[in-house]
Image (cartoon, grey):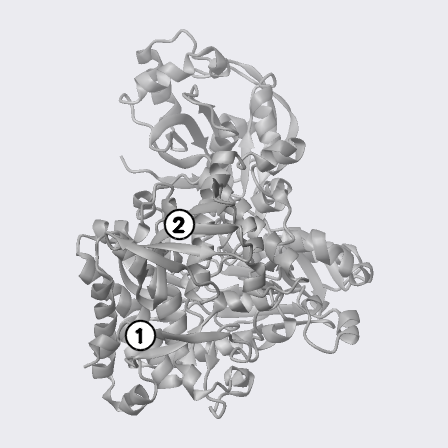
Amino acid sequence: MSTCFEKYVPQAGIFALRPLRIPEDMPLVHGWVTQEYAKYWGLQGKSVDEVAAAYRDIVSPEHVHAYIGLHDGKPAFLVECYHSMHDAIGRYYDALPSDRGMHVLVAPAEKRIPDFTWHVFAVIMDFLFSDQTVTRVVVEPDARNEKIHALNRRAGFEVVRTVDLPATSVQPAKKALLSFCTRQQYAAASTVRTAPMKTSISSSPGAAVAHLDPRTWAIVNRQHVRKIIGEFAHELLVTPELEGTVDGWGHYRLATDQANVEYRFRARILQLDHWHIDTESIERFVDGARTPLDSLALILELHTTLGIAPAMLPTYMEEITSTLYGAAYKYETQRLTAAELTRASFQEVETSMTEGHPSFVANNGRIGFDALDYRAYAPEAASPVSLIWIAVHESRAAFSSIDGLTYGDMIHEELGTTVLDSFHGILRGKGLNPESYLFMPVHPWQWFNKLASIFAPDIAAHRLVYLGSSEDRYFAQQSIRTFFNTTNPHKRYVKTSLSILNMGFMRGLSPYYMIGTPAINQWVHETIGKDAYLRENGFSILREVATVGYRNTYYEAAIPGDSPYKKMLAALWRESPIPPLTEGQRLMTMASLLHRDREGGSVLMELIASSGVGADTWLRSYLKAYLSPLLHCFYAYDMVFMPHGENLILVLQNNVPVRALMKDVAEEVAVMNKDAVLPEKVKRLAVSVPEELKVLSIFTDVFDCIFRYVGHVLVEHGIPEERFWKLVAECVHDYHRARPDLTEKFERYDLFAPEFTRSCLNRLQLGNNQQMIDLADPAKNLKFAGTLKNPIAAFKA
């Protein structure tokens, strides 16, 4: 029997509900309800048949439903849900049609999982509130049942009064605590928790470092040392010395800035100077003695060669340490195998990713988060987050949106009438006029760490007013400051300012950029929508449809130029990818194609295997969905994106990519033609880029930063890289044949040129890890090191 609700909980597993089956489930249920710990269910001493009879009575009314709860596919709990208005409890209070009641019983544990009972309880609450007609959950536990009272309090239930419930045919008489929990109370309780582990960690500090055991630390350091050597060698920052070749593997020695320290390993150099290093072969020698691998030590041993400025070295080392801390956490908490991820939900995949940007050595710095914040807001922690809502005065704030979307409509769709009325009431209670304010969400970390102090004058003057927490709950995405609505997946993403340092940038949002963001998205969307080739391909963007930005006038006056202090308070709403899906389609971030599980299993290869279409057919479909539209945007419109794995969502049918969705558009789209005729609000997209660098938008951003790693995965699984690059060349040729009118541009920006300029991302970060590039002039700060041989040049027609 199929399940009717599923939820993935990090560190705990996959939970699901299916309808109770009578009599098939009765031996199982009998084994649970007759235990001593289930005494409040009143079924001790009953036979299997008597338990079956009791459950026939329980579910006979149409308003009652019973479910078996599954944990990782195995029965683990029992839950009864009912419409309290039609139940006996409805006689003890003013029951509403939107009320639901529930009873829950957790099976005896086979093995201990921390907080398991709470996870079960939260899954049931999420199940009940997944019905949008439900606004309140009602419970009436026995007054003596302290364990369930603790769970109720944790979820946000409020005890109203004690009631004496008479005995029924299936329940003994009891003194019960009548308790209610609204959607808002549940959301507020989740904000207090922020993450399931946060309270327990703050009361037990050792839990914050429980994943940092010697074995795990050694594993993630070995993997990271491999990445350091491979990426720095790719960018010609270091030059390993070939000492010989055995069985097709080169044996290399890497000298360091310290004469007594060297590294040895074996590797194959693939296309695009990609170093395929045998991870287990890496050895570090100090004075000739083999010593453990240590990423931080390697950075120190190379820092002169790398040219890191002394003032920046400590911050870069902190980013490396934070990256390792996160890698250890991901390794220890990773539950889903590569094969399981090919069947997982969109957000299960999103929260399972381990790599981040594959080219960057320091790719998970997140400087500003403490250990509690990490578990609350890091995407891999998969902790549900309730956003904080504030009101901002229109004298300092601006709202922008696409045509046809008003502020009133947008905010009503996001909050609903009840919450809006509540927020209006808060403002009126302070003697303020709601018509003079805009509502906006903020990241909880930003509120506590930046806004409450830096914006204190505005708060004191009621130009900025705290309103409360969202009823909807969200998951942080790989892009760290973007949230996906898990309560209502059809609702929009929310992207917020987050003043932490992560991979070369402070992750704020500019209120000035926000003003033009919807117009840019509308123009890009319309341009794509009018194009027959792109429509046929299925390529589209997830529009950033609305923004709110707030200006801090003190810092505007103090700082003439750009500054993170000017980017602390802004937000945008982006379309959800869920509504456009058709029957049988599912979503997966393109970053997952490079993901490997703890045992080295590859999501890419599991997708190919599960699709049943063969590697070549699968890869052709992927290239058509991803590469073809990027080629067309570049050649037909001079329009380029930042098409890395986190910015692309693949739409899969039978695990085969059929189209691609581009997101994070406004800050990362450009038209590489300074003379382009664009609408007034879109003119900032026109940038001046040297002719010889324009084609790097394909060579660097796609070939070097994505396909280089795809080719590596394929080689590891026995597919020659020449076969993959030939398919890439075929895709380019197919596009050339489809658009002969663009032949002159194909020749000017030749994708079959023998070589292209090597653009180096780590060199950028090593040069300035506070702000790698100026987004207004992205070509200005690029760093180059020679050229790379073009892997498709051999297939030029």
Q: CA distance from mark 2 to mark 1?
A: 32 Å
Q: Quadrant of the C terminus?
A: bottom left
**Residue 450 at x, y percent in the picture:** 72, 57
Instruction: Depth check: give the residue in front, 431 or 203.
Output: 203
Crowd rating for badge 2 (residues with CA inside 10 Å; few <14, some 14–19, many 20+): many
Tell me the residue that label 2 is attached to: 349
> Would you place residue 674 above or below residue 258 in this image?
below
**Residue 579 at x, y percent in the picture:** 38, 60
Q: Give the image quarter of residue 694.
A: bottom left
Instruction: Depth check: give the residue in front, 794 or 621.
Output: 794
Tell me the residue that label 1 is attached to: 790
Determine the residue positioned at 20% across, 83% down.
737
Determine the residue positioned at 79% across, 70% down.
554
> Would you place residue 527 above or below residue 598 in this image?
below
797 lies left or right of 303? left
Label 2 or label 1, whichever lies nearer to me, is 1
Q: Amino acid at mark 2?
A: Val
Crowd rating for badge 1 (residues with CA inside 10 Å; few <14, some 14–19, many 20+): many
Labelled disc at residue 245: none
> Would you place residue 792 above or below residue 125 in this image?
below
Instruction: Depth check: give the residue in front, 353 or 535.
Output: 353
Q: Amino acid at mark 1?
A: Asn
Determine the residue positioned at 38% across, 41% down.
598
**Residue 449 at x, y percent in the picture:** 71, 53
